[in-house]
Image: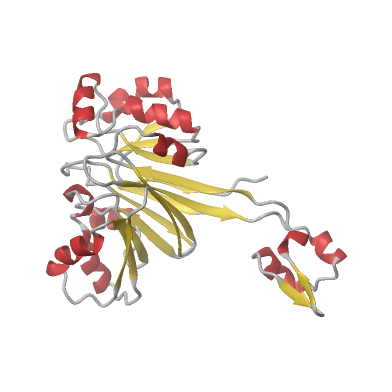
């Protein structure tokens, strides 16, 4: 299962009750963060989660509202006695940007490992997560991310018995390992069915609508998507500043056939996002106006 918490939903500047952009997920003891705006570590504590387990931090881009909370977060992680390395992922220039910020966070007791993105789409595997970074359309280089948790095929004990496989080796086959018995190789496909549907979460902010976003969000369990503006009269602002309207995000969700969509990254002028959800739901019914610390647990479906 994948725990998901939308830590902050504000764009540009924090507001009372609305911290800047950040998302946190937890999977089997590993915690991953996407973006780290001002107030992120406060939101984590308000949620009751720990900063100690954060081992991966992804950045969409390097505007201040997406990265300004990083030095304080890293210091808090150090003060929580973390010594294991932390992997940071983001567009080209990541190491230079982070090292500049860390002038005010010296002496960290853990190493920072940098993975800089340069291609339009890049697939990464780290700490059990299958990550896909995909470039979107903002006024600086910006990436969205999909997080997938794969699920293997169903295990058939009767097939294991048919091949005289000792019970103590079944678990290794279930994990996809090939084993050898009396000089004979036993492959997982002998006892496993086809791969089953896993879990897929997609997170994207600061972009105009793009086909790449639609493609990468296809069939996601949850799409967390920028909705900078709900007001129809702000369409010009959205185009000029390369952001998205609620309606545009809803069209992407509908086209990608996602299960659910949460809106985030609101303009400071948008004080009551819920006032614009009626029209949004006409386009994509399973839309929700995201709120700080809004959470869910995504689980494998029974098949």
Depth order, front residue of 40/68: 68
Residue at the spot x=52%, y=54% of the render? 149
Q: Does the rendering let one see residue 191? A: no
Instruction: Give the image quarter of residue 243.
Output: top left
Q: In the rendered view, would you say 17 is above or below 45?
A: above
> Left or right: 43 with respect to 173?
left
Depth order, front residue of 114/77: 114
How many labels, in total?
Answer: 0
> Left or right: 289 with respect to 16?
right
Outermost residue toward the bottom?
A: 182
Q: In the rendered view, would you say 198 is above or below 238?
A: below
Residue at the spot x=18%, y=55% of the render? 68
Give the percent coordinates (x, y) of residue 156. Answer: 77, 58
> Left or right: 142 with respect to 159?
left
> Left or right: 245 with respect to 103?
right
**Quadrant of image for the C terminus:** top right
Depth order, front residue of 51/114: 114
Residue at the spot x=17%, y=50% of the render? 64
Residue at the spot x=40%, y=26% of the render? 251
Instruction: Give the image quarter of residue 232.
Output: top left
User: What colouring method underlies this structural image?
Assistant: secondary structure
């Amino acid at each position: 299962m994948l725990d998901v918490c939308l830590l902050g939903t504000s764009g540009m500047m924090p507001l009372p009750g609305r911290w800047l952009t950040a998302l946190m997920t937890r999977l089997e003891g590993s915690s991953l963060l996407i973006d780290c705006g001002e107030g992120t570590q406060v939101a984590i504590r308000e949620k009751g989660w720990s900063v100690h387990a954060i081992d991966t931090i992804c950045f969409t881009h390097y505007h201040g509202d997406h990265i300004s909370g990083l030095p304080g977060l890293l210091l808090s992680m150090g003060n929580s006695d973390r010594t294991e390395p932390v992997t940071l992922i983001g567009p080209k220039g990541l190491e230079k940007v982070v090292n500049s910020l860390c002038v005010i966070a010296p002496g960290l007791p853990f190493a920072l490992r940098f993975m800089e993105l340069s291609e339009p789409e890049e697939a990464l595997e780290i700490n059990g997560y299958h990550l896909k970074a995909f470039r979107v359309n903002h006024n600086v280089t910006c990436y969205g991310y999909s997080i997938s948790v794969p699920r293997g095929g169903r295990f058939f004990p009767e097939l294991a018995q048919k091949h005289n496989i000792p019970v103590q080796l079944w678990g290794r086959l279930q994990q996809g390992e090939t084993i050898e018995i009396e000089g004979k190789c036993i492959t997982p496909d002998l006892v496993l069915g086809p791969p089953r549907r896993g879990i897929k979460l997609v997170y994207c902010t600061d972009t105009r609508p793009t086909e790449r976003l639609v493609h990468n969000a296809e069939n996601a369990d949850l799409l967390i998507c920028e909705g900078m503006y709900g007001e129809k009269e702000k369409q010009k602002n959205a185009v000029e500043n390369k952001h998205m309207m609620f309606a545009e995000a809803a069209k992407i969700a509908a086209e990608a056939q996602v299960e659910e969509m949460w809106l985030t990254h609101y303009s400071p002028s948008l004080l009551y996002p819920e006032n614009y959800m009626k029209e949004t739901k006409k386009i994509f019914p399973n839309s929700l106006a995201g709120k700080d610390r809004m959470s869910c647990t995504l689980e494998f479906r029974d098949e």
